[in-house]
Image (cartoon, rainbow, N blue to C red):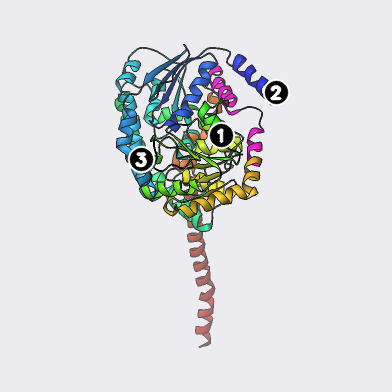
């Protein structure tokens, strides 16, 4: 541990070699997305780079070399666009892809590029060395790289997907890589593999036929004097950073410019506020932390479900911390402490914390694994079901469907995870694997970003696959020619055989006539 910290300090001080001007773009109004993007930006600022960040949430107490450009109004506009996220729980994957590609992607790109603060920056005459953009259906925003004559780096708020594979030419075999909109992990049944293939076809059809043309139109409107086309900008990505790690998820094939930095948002543990620290320190029977994340709100839970949780918590000997966005809960039991905001990473690090009840978001799941805490997952939408299913399969957590939430079911899953030692043992093992690496997630991210800076875009990392059309990449043209050749061979063989058969039959017919 000491050696790794010394290495980290060494990298922070020496790895850059030069100060770069960096523009970071965090276009979505979701705090979980912001936490990931802001982690990269703060990391680069601490390393001495000149950092400008377009984001919905300005960084408080930012260093002098960190400039905020606020995307005012994006949070309110996003919530108006998306509505209540609990309504998406039972939406089918087919419909979900339609909704995402036709609404969210277009909204994020247009809102960001048309924002007055962004327009002022674009017209300022400034240049940057690197532009770092979140890749979450935001391809048109990549155009800021060519606008500022900069190299382009993107980061994914979760793991690999169709969008990241498209940028790097990385293969995504459907036999063991589930589609991002499905609730599968990497161990799929025949039925799941069949459905995975179908949804991948559907996903590709919408992505290429609906989403990318829409992003291209936004790109051309925002950058009428662009020196390169939308497609060329897509192929120019120097690096893709993934918020994933093989020890926490699935093994996948990556191109050299796809780098796993799962847990990059995890900060050093800080002292807890006095009231929370006292509450947990005195939890002699252990404590449970309950949060539905930054986008979902516990106050939006159906009333019957909320009351079921409260009744169940009142019967526990453990203390419960609940991120609840209201100051009061009627008939709140004494072992329950509610707060509209809680320092999640610091809470999960507390030795008395025994269980994390979560919506299954990737950031919270990663933090729980980092600190070795088992989970109960209540997934609602997005990748949450996939994360919870992975926890269930690997044995560090279990699933509680929101539709099945009752006082009895809540008590049952809590009892199962707290009193069955396999959960705590498994999560401890996975945590050890995650920590056993030469560099932390932050050190890895810093190294590779500065690698791109040092090598002026590091074009040598890019796979030649990004230059290939879909037909060429999938060898459809070659397969077509081979099928045609085989068809010709079969056709010619058939007629040769037919001609030979006629020749063989002809003497027999003649001899029969002579005998007659």
Which residues are the magenta region? Answer: 429-456
Mark found first going from the N terminus, 2 or 1: 2
Residue beneath label 1, please?
280
User: What separation in Å lies between label 2 and label 1 (alpha carbons)?
Assistant: 31 Å
Where is residue 80? Give x, y as percent. 29, 36
Q: Which residue is mark 2?
A: 3
Q: Nearer the viewer, mark 3 or mark 2?
A: 2
Distance from Cα at disc 1 to Cα at disc 3: 44 Å
Q: Is residue 354 above or below residue 133?
A: below
Of the residues under marks 1 and 3, which one precedes in the sequence? 3
Disc 3 is placed on an element classified as helix
| Residue 463 showing in the rendered view | no
Percent x, y of residue 515: 53, 87
Extreme residue toward the bottom, this view: 516
Nearest to the observer: residue 165 or residue 320:
320
Residue pointed to by mark 3:
101
Residue for point 43% across, 20% down: 59
Residue at image point 31% right, 23% down: 115
Q: Is residue 324 left or right of residue 512?
A: left
């Amino acid at each position: 541990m000491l050696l790794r910290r010394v290495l980290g300090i060494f990298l922070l001080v020496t790895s850059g070699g030069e100060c770069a001007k960096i523009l970071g773009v965090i276009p979505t109004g979701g705090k979980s997305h912001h936490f990931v993007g802001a982690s990269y930006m703060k990391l680069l600022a601490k390393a001495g780079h000149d950092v400008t960040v377009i984001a919905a949430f300005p960084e408080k107490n930012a260093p002098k070399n960190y400039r905020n450009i606020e995307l005012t109004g994006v949070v309110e506009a996003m919530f108006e666009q998306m509505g209540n996220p609990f309504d998406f729980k039972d939406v089918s994957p087919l419909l979900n892809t339609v909704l995402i590609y036709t609404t969210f992607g277009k909204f994020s790109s247009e809102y960001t590029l048309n924002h007055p603060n962004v327009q002022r920056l674009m017209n300022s005459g400034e240049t940057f060395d690197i532009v770092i953009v979140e890749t979450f259906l935001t391809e048109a925003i990549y155009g800021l790289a060519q606008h500022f004559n900069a190299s382009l780096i993107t980061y994914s708020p979760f793991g690999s997907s169709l969008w990241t594979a498209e940028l790097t030419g990385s293969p995504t075999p459907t036999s063991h890589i589930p589609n991002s909109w499905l609730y599968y992990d990497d161990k799929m049944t025949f039925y799941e593999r069949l459905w995975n293939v179908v949804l991948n076809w559907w996903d590709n059809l919408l992505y290429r036929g609906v989403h990318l043309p829409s992003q291209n139109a936004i790109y051309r409107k925002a950058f009428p004097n662009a020196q390169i086309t939308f497609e060329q900008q897509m192929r120019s990505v120097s690096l893709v950073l993934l918020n994933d790690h093989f020890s926490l998820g699935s093994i996948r094939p990556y191109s050299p410019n796809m780098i796993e930095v799962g847990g990059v948002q995890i900060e050093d543990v800080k002292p807890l506020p006095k009231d929370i620290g006292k509450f947990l320190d005195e939890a002699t029977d252990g404590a449970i932390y309950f949060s539905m994340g930054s986008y979902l709100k516990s106050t939006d839970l159906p009333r019957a479900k909320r009351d079921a949780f409260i009744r169940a918590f009142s019967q526990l000997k453990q203390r419960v911390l609940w991120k609840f966005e209201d100051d009061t809960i009627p008939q709140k039991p004494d072992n329950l402490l509610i707060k509209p905001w809680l320092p999640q990473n610091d809470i999960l690090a507390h030795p008395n914390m025994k269980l994390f009840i979560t919506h299954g978001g990737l950031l919270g799941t990663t933090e729980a694994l980092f600190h070795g805490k088992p989970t109960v997952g209540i997934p609602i939408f997005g990748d949450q079901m996939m994360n919870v299913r992975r926890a269930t399969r690997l044995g560090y957590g279990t699933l509680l469907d929101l539709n099945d939430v009752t006082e009895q079911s809540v008590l049952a899953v809590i009892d199962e995870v707290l009193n069955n030692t396999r959960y705590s043992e498994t999560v401890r093992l996975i945590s050890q694997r995650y920590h056993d690496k030469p560099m932390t997630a932050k050190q890895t991210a810093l190294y590779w970003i500065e690698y791109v800076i040092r090598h002026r875009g590091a074009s040598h990392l890019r796979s030649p696959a990004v230059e290939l059309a879909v037909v060429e990449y999938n060898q459809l043209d070659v397969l077509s020619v081979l099928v045609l050749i085989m068809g010709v061979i079969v056709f010619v063989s058939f007629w040769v055989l037919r001609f030979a058969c006629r020749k063989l039959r002809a003497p027999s017919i003649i001899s029969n006539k002579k005998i007659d």
